[in-house]
Image (cartoon, rainbow, N blue to C red):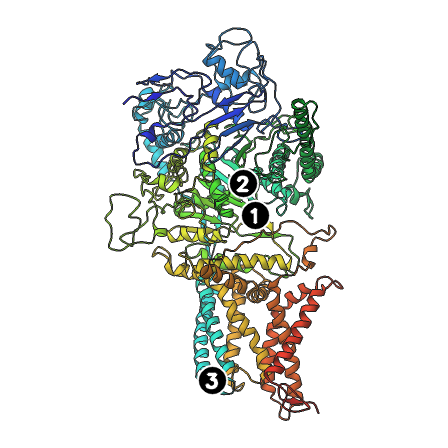
């Protein structure tokens, strides 16, 4: 069968041959036509099947000729690739389902001037070819790249036209272009780059990018690449590449190592020295002292025994005078004991961990035998920042988070930041562009003076002395200049909404005038009617914004817009780029690396009729897009209000991933720390009991739960693979996903099945069912084994299993091209997840408002482990709602997700045998804890009912009951003290947590149970609003939100409990005082427990009061209504028996 072949650029490698050769492969998605509109209005097509249609229309039939590329035969495509990347980074890519994928060349991204050469829309010279006004090719510094000695300025499109259709003739001097690589061109214009740095070996034909990258990394298992003469060893190179031409080994020994003329024994001795060298771990466990942990475990056992004896005694000694009161108390106490066991058992083995950053630097960033240049061998990290609504999540907050990411202390070329704007707002887009522009000054300033923290808003708001430990003489001048620039940056961000609105109004008026003129030309004498033109939102370059408009319109609303990808900062050069004195105005960055990490704006396609799955769907879209564009083997996800407080946080997390056994870690969870919390932490916003207590304890089991932000993921674990070296305990685990295994007698639930990962270097992952699981993107599927290989620890010791050779990640990255970004547009379209396992077993899991817990549970259920990384300096910091209403709604969302988990297949009772028992109990407690609210509310009313009725939960307050009560109280206090000791929290924080446990349990948790039951029984979906990240209106008070009272129905149950207990105390005292035979024991028991309830609700009552003298009227109204209702209800239940008697059988004298 003959096959049509069209020539394509080597760097735009999307092959359809693989699709034709796989008859069982699912059908391809609708064809994507890629086109780029230049500033002159010309469209350049980049169709997948016809990438060079504008250059050649001739078809070649029946045969294909491949010329082997050798070190002596290297075509001049490096320049084309680099310039292609430059144009890709200046284009706004849009597309989606049944839509054309276009790349709109952005001559202007924001109103302010752009200076950094990596940024989209950077200023440059114009092409001198008549009829073309595109930008000239430029290097890393933004200097023009002129391929001809006549210095004729030419853009990339015209250059390719001249090379491919004009026989390589310069349009200026009419001379033949000389074959020069990109380094020679950069050196000619005075740009950066290393003089004499050899150009990498050419890519083998017929191989995709990811195949080339993987083959290159695998070829690094050999150390020797030169012959003893110092020349390139072609024979050895051919041998190591299995007889095919392609990339060779990027690892070269130091000069003189192989030129001493000695025999191979010298190499053997060096290998033995390397093997015998003491192996230093990157992390270590810090055990809790036995003097604390042993008594802690003993007290847990003692209290459990006492609870069993106490409950047994309570059951055997009922209160026959008030059997109803006794019965309710027994049921509640049994549940409380069960809940306490679920919460306490996972805490029996808490641990601490420590990292060694010096060892990490020594292994990965210092010259070694396998890495003589000392270039960073650390794996890449893709950082995800999610935002959805610029009104509730201010763009300035998101911009500060992005600036802290761009300035992080990690190899620049290994970082990539992706911002997910689920609202598709132009405000967020331009705010990110402003942040990228300001990063040109902020990031080198942080590197030069070692600034911490690297969030400019937090840094300039520090109360401490900013000049401490600063030794450079120009620091004061630099800081003053950067502070002024940051103030101007904030003003520009704050002014963006008005700027966008004014610009759109101006363009709209122009369009209306234009439409009226056209109508007048068509109708000369007839009266002209007002022409209605759809009011669009306009970008800075005078074109329509493809996302959500300020005035929603079809295909331009929050739930209906195209997919958008804009490379705000193109990938940095592979070598450090030292700054110059004029690079940032008055600042001197001569010895500072001025490169910036790649920054990409992503807004996935949304269309009516599709379930977009909120944040989880946005995260999965970023996973797919990043896999195609950068494919970092690790993913760090952050909320838009959580910024990097410790610039070395990612290095700390990488210590765990790259340590021995790190290949079995699915994620490293960092604790959440918050700023802007009131000093008393009224509503337990810091949540230290959970983050420093429960999470440390889980770290001693299978690992902490995933809490939604501040988590470093292993990409391959997100893809749903099993951990390496998994020992199958069940005969049918994973039997559906790889061949060659015998099926067992039992079936496994679908969510427990996973693609299996190879256990050794020679065993490849089975991707036969990959299209059904991951979709039809070939580039995405090809990237999976690359990400798995790059994420392995270093094989620097025989004890390290499933490792990679040292130096494998020192190779340059692949350059971005148009087809790659077009493929990324395709995988973020709304149809891509149809009939795949995204959200079911792959990526973030759908079906719960707490997708984070479910996603972590699925990984632990497959046998993965996680680690809790507590750094000396907080890794990340964010904001938390200090307003009572916002806090209750936040807790409501978490509790509702837990109820959904309990009633779903993700219930820990259905977990696989790979999950440890105590880990399963911890996850079971996550799903059960909201149900405690039912028993807690009943128990909070029991003291009041006791006081109203004159009865108590026991017949009499005898010695046995009091001893049991005393022992239970003392043990819980002693456990709290020991827990404070090993977790590092304060006793006040523990008490605040207890208070808010009751506040949330009597309000939000109860509502969550009811909403969860409605969803399960009636199928009523639950919708939640975003937690506001904005501050209060009072700029003079940092804690203005604390005193704002926003009424919500969640406040009614706690108010009722408080009012009932207060009235009951009054009634109880009145009855006892005026009764003939006072029952003081029953009164004391009821009053004691009523005060216990009121003490826990004190922060809630204080929050209802607001500021002094500003208590809302609705609080008084509800309190009065509740008091009257309770009084009338009690009179109706127990009416007066005489003329002078009050309900409750006591009389006034």
Residue at mark 2: 560
Can see residue 454?
A: no
Q: Quadrant of residue 467?
A: top right
Q: Is residue 325 left or right of residue 252?
A: right
Q: Residue at x 44, y 63 (%)?
A: 348
Q: Residues within 10 Å of mark 1 (few under 14, many from 20)?
A: many
Q: CA distance from mark 1 to mark 3?
A: 53 Å
Residue 740 on image: x %, y %: 24, 43
Report if the CB atoms under discs 1 and 3 are less than 8 Å apart. Answer: no
Q: CA distance from mark 2 to mark 3?
A: 64 Å
- N-term-proximal mark, 1 vs 3: 3
Of marks 2 and 3, the one in the foreground: 2
Q: Residues within 10 Å of mark 3 (few under 14, many from 20)?
A: some
Residue 777 on image: x %, y %: 40, 35
The quadrant in which the C terminus is found is: bottom right
In this rendering, the answer to whether 534 lies above or below 349 is above
- N-term-proximal mark, 1 vs 2: 2
Q: Residues within 10 Å of mark 2 (few under 14, many from 20)?
A: many
In this rendering, the answer to whether 212 lies above or below 934 is above
Q: Which mark is residue 876?
A: 1
Of marks 1 and 3, the one in the foreground: 3
Report if the CB atoms under discs 2 and 3 are less than 8 Å apart. Answer: no
Q: Which mark is residue 1138?
A: none
Residue at mark 3: 318
């Amino acid at each position: 069968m003959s096959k049509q072949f069209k020539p394509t650029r080597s760097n735009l490698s999307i092959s359809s041959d693989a699709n034709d050769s796989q008859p069982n492969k699912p059908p391809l998605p609708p064809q994507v036509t890629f086109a780029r509109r230049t500033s002159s209005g010309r469209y350049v097509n980049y169709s997948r099947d016809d990438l060079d249609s504008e250059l050649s229309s001739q078809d070649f039939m029946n045969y294909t000729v491949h010329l082997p590329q050798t070190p002596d035969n290297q075509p001049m495509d490096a320049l084309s690739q680099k310039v292609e990347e430059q144009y890709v980074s200046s284009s706004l890519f849009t597309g989606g389902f049944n839509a054309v994928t276009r790349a709109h060349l952005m001559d202007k991204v924001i109103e302010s001037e752009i200076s950094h050469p990596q940024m989209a829309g950077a200023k440059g010279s114009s092409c001198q070819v008549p009829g073309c006004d595109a930008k000239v090719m430029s290097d890393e510094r933004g200097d023009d790249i002129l391929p001809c000695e006549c210095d004729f300025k030419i853009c990339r499109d015209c250059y390719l036209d001249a090379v491919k259709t004009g026989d390589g003739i310069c349009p200026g001097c009419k001379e033949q272009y000389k074959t020069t690589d990109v380094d020679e061109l950069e050196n000619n214009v005075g740009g950066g780059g290393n003089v004499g740095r050899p150009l990498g070996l050419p890519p083998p034909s017929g191989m995709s990018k990811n195949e080339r990258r993987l083959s290159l990394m695998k070829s690094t298992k050999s150390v020797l690449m030169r012959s003893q003469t110092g020349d390139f060893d072609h024979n050895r190179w051919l041998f190591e590449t299995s007889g095919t031409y392609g990339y060779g080994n990027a690892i070269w020994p130091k000069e003189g190592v192989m030129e001493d003329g000695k025999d191979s024994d010298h190499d053997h001795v060096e290998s033995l020295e390397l093997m015998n060298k003491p192996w230093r771990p990157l992390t270590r466990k810090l055990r809790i002292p036995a003097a604390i942990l042993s008594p802690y475990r003993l007290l847990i056992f003692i209290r459990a025994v006492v609870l069993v004896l106490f409950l047994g005694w309570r059951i055997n000694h009922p209160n026959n005078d008030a059997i109803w009161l006794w019965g309710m108390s027994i049921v509640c106490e049994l549940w409380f004991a069960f809940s306490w066991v679920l919460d306490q058992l996972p805490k029996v083995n808490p641990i601490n961990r420590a990292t060694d950053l010096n060892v990490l630097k020594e292994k990965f960033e210092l010259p070694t035998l396998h890495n003589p240049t000392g270039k960073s061998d650390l794996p890449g990290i893709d950082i995800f920042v999610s935002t959805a609504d610029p009104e509730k999540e201010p763009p300035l907050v998101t911009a500060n988070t992005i600036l802290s990411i761009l300035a992080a202390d990690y190899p620049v070329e290994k970082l990539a930041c992706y911002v997910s704007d689920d609202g598709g707002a132009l405000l967020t887009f331009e705010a990110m562009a402003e942040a990228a522009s300001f990063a040109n000054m902020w990031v080198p300033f942080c590197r030069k003076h070692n600034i911490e923290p690297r969030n400019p808003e937090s840094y300039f708001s520090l109360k401490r002395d900013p000049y401490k430990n600063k030794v450079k003489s120009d620091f004061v001048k630099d800081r003053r200049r950067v502070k002024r620039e940051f103030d101007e940056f904030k003003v520009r961000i704050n002014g963006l909404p008005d700027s966008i609105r004014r610009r759109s109004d101006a363009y709209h008026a122009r369009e209306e005038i234009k439409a009226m003129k056209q109508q007048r030309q068509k109708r000369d004498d007839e009266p002209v009617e007002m022409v209605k033109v759809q009011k669009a939102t306009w970008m800075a370059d005078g074109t329509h914004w493809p996302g959500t408009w300020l005035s929603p319109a079809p295909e331009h609303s929050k739930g209906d817009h195209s997919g958008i990808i804009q490379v705000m900062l193109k990938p940095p050069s592979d070598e450090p780029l030292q700054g110059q004195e004029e690079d940032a105005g008055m600042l001197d960055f001569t010895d500072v690396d001025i490169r910036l990490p790649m920054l990409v704006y992503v807004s996935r396609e949304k269309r009516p009729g599709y379930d977009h799955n909120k944040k989880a769907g946005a995260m999965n879209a970023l996973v797919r897009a990043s896999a195609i564009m950068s494919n970092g083997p690790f993913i760090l996800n952050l909320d838009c209000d959580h910024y990097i407080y410790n610039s070395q946080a990612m290095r700390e997390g990488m210590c765990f991933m790259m340590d021995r056994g790190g290949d079995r870690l699915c994620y490293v969870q960092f604790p959440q720390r918050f700023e802007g919390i009131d000093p008393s932490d009224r509503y337990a916003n810091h949540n230290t009991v959970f983050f420093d207590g429960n999470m440390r304890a889980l770290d001693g089991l299978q690992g902490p739960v995933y809490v939604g932000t501040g988590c470093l993921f292993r990409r391959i674990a997100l893809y749903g693979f099993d951990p390496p070296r998994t020992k199958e305990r069940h005969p049918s685990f994973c039997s559906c996903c790889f061949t060659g295994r015998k099926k067992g007698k039992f079936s496994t639930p679908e969510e427990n099945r996973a693609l299996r990962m190879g256990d050794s270097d020679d065993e490849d992952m089975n991707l036969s069912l990959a299209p059904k699981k991951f979709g039809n993107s070939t580039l995405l599927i090809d990237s999976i084994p690359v990400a798995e290989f790059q994420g392995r620890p270093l094989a620097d010791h025989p004890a390290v299993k499933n490792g990679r050779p040292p130096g494998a990640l020192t190779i340059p990255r692949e350059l971005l091209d148009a087809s790659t970004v077009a493929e990324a547009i395709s995988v973020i379209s709304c149809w891509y997840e149809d009939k795949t396992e995204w959200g079911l077993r792959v990526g973030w899991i759908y079906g719960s408002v707490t997708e984070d817990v479910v996603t972590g549970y699925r990984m632990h259920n497959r046998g993965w482990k996680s680690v809790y990384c507590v750094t000396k300096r907080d890794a990340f910091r964010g904001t938390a709602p200090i307003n009572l209403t916002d806090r209750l709604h936040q807790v409501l969302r978490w509790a509702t997700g837990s109820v959904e988990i309990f009633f779903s297949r993700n219930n820990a009772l259905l977990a696989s045998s790979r999950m440890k028992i105590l880990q399963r109990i911890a996850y079971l407690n996550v799903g059960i804890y909201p149900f405690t609210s039912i028993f807690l509310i009943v128990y909070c009313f029991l003291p009041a009912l006791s006081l109203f009725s004159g009865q108590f939960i026991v017949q009499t307050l005898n010695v046995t009951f009091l001893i049991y009560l005393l022992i239970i109280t003392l043990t819980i206090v002693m456990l709290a003290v020991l827990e404070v000791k090993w977790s590092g929290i304060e006793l006040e924080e523990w008490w605040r947590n207890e208070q808010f446990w009751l506040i949330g349990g009597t309000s939000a948790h109860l509502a969550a149970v009811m909403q969860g039951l409605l969803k399960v029984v009636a199928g009523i979906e639950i919708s939640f609003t975003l937690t506001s990240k904005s501050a209060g209106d009072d700029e003079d008070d940092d804690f203005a939100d604390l005193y704002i009272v926003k009424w919500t129905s969640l406040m009614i149950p706690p108010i009722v409990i408080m009012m009932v207990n207060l009235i009951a105390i009054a009634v109880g005292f009145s009855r006892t005082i005026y009764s003939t035979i006072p029952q003081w024991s029953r009164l004391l028991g009821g009053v004691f427990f009523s005060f216990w309830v009121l003490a826990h609700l004190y922060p809630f009552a204080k929050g209802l009061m607001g500021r002094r003298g500003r208590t809302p009227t609705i609080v008084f109204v509800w309190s009065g209504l509740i008091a009257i209702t309770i009084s009338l209800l009690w009179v109706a239940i127990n009416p007066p028996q005489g003329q002078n008697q009050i309900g409750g059988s006591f009389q006034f004298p």
